[in-house]
Image: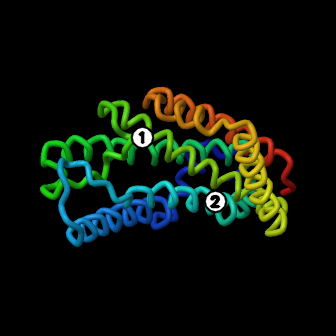
Amino acid sequence: MRSAPIVTVVRYLLLDRVTYLVLPWAWAAFGFVLDVVVLQLIPAGHGDDRWVGGLVAVPLVMLVVGAQSIARAMPFALTLGVSRRTYFLAATALALALSTGFGLVVAIGRTVEHATGGWGIGMAYFRVPHLLDGPWYLSWLTATTVLVLMFVYGMWYGLVYRRAGLPGTTAFAAAQLGVLALTALVATWAHGWTAIGHYLGTLTATGLTDALTVAVAVLLTGGFATIRRMTI
């Protein structure tokens, strides 16, 4: 596997088909069934936009899958002579391919959902409020970007774990929570929550996708900087 091309490393990762090809789809199906059960137990409302949130499970699964792509699969690949750069690019390419496929399913699901009146029960499974409300092609792009974001975010956690172990990963997570808490304190002190709420309320799907794309670029930069400093 020495000097392996990116495609070869992607194929190596896909040897674990359960993690990459089965787990996200299984959770998507589980979330769909769960939404149907929940909506059957509550009184029907008006319209066809009753959203429960089962689809949220999929980005969370992608976060875990991204972490495992580094923490579990990378050490053996490196011992076979794969460079850290090649492995990182291969994992990113896999994230993009998986997310693009699932994003297309989301876009098709939204179309079917609309045509069937929310699957006959007014359910909004694929039509996530304020996130997947635009045209089908924009929903495809947004869903793809969200899933890539979560996968790459998980990769970064996996890299931190491989480099610094559990204490370092805990500190990494705590630092991010600290930044969020500090940001909330500053917003409260400056009475800025109204302005923040107004901005989020006026944010279009295109603007949100652009912001998510920037976040992906930041995470990729941070992840690549981390993997370059890892010892083999």
Determine which quarter of the picture holds residue 101: top left
Disc 2 secondary structure class: helix
Location of residue 90 in the rendering, given as x and y in whole percent from the top left corner: 61, 45
Quadrant occupied by the C terminus: bottom right
Residue denoted by label 2: 67
What residue is at 20 percent from the left and 69 percent from the top? 40
Q: How much space separates mark 2 and mark 1, taking CA atoms?
A: 25 Å
Viewer-proximal residue, 82 or 62? 62
What residue is at 47 percent from the left and 43 percent from the top? 97
Location of residue 52 in the rendering, given as x and y in whole percent from the top left corner: 34, 59
Viewer-proximal residue, 113 or 64? 113
Amino acid at dot 2: Ala
Location of residue 198 in the rendering, given as x and y in whole percent from the top left corner: 52, 32
Disc 1 secondary structure class: loop
Check the image and report above or below for 152 versus 216. below
Location of residue 215 in the rendering, given as x and y in whole percent from the top left corner: 63, 37
Eye-nearest disc, 2 or 1: 1
Amino acid at dot 1: Leu
What residue is at 26 percent from the left and 47 percent from the top? 109
- Checking the image for residue 51, the label placed there is none
Determine which quarter of the picture holds residue 196: top right
Viewer-proximal residue, 213 or 178? 178
* Left or right relative to 140: residue 109: left
Residue denoted by label 1: 131
* Left or right relative to 223: residue 197: left
* Left or right relative to 108: residue 158: right
